[in-house]
Amino acid sequence: MELKADVQLTLNSVKDYLTGDNSDIIPTDTIKKHCPCPGQVKTIEGFALDICNHFLTAFKHVTRAKVDIEEAPWKRLEKNAVEHAHAFIFSPESWRFCEVEQYRNANAVIHSGIKDMKVLKTTQSGFEGFLKDRFTTLQEAKDRVFCTSVYARWRYNQHEEVNFDMAW
């Protein structure tokens, strides 16, 4: 599993901006080392929740944690319908992502999604009966090639006992 994570923290003071006092600033190098081992990740949503929870409990001056994660689309290499134990192929069918934001003493807000999923339909994809005005030059077509890139994002109403993988 290859992940790209972006962690944003909000502090309860702005003295770094106003006076140049960095005593409350958590350096990015420290943030990277505080994140749990990605080898133990079951879902990116659960991983993002763990990171938010960690920073909100480990640092009393952190008032908000926001974590965005993208999961690179790797698949196990197969030979004769048997998955290889340790060989993978990059398969960019789509990218899975999540955005988790949590304020201190509040419930986390979780969005998940899929992006860059390319869909192609080679026939039975007509486009007709659309609005036409003086700027319309597109001709109606009963049959045509259709290609698009899908971006879908959704929000979970709650996250306790949710099987995030079932959404896929």
Image: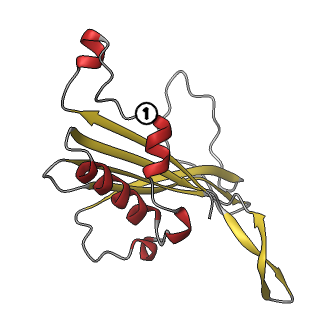
Q: Residue at x 37, y 76 (%)?
A: 163
Task: Please provide percent x and percent y for residue 88.
Answer: 77, 69
The answer to whether 103 appears left or right of 100 in the picture is: left
For residue 23, what is the image quadrant? top left
For residue 20, what is the image quadrant? top left
Pick whichever, 12 or 69, lies toward us. Answer: 12
Q: Is residue 6 visible?
A: no
The quadrant of the image that shows the N terminus is bottom right
From the image, tell me which residue sits under label 1. 27
The answer to whether 44 appears left or right of 146 in the picture is: left
Q: Residues within 10 Å of mark 1 (few under 14, many from 20)?
A: few
Secondary structure at numbered mark 1: loop
Q: Is residue 77 visible?
A: yes
Task: Please provide percent x and percent y for residue 113.
Answer: 45, 56
Pick whichever, 107 or 114, lies toward us. Answer: 107
What amino acid type should be assigned to the residue bearing mark 1? Pro
Q: Which residue is drawn at 55% across and 22% down?
A: 135
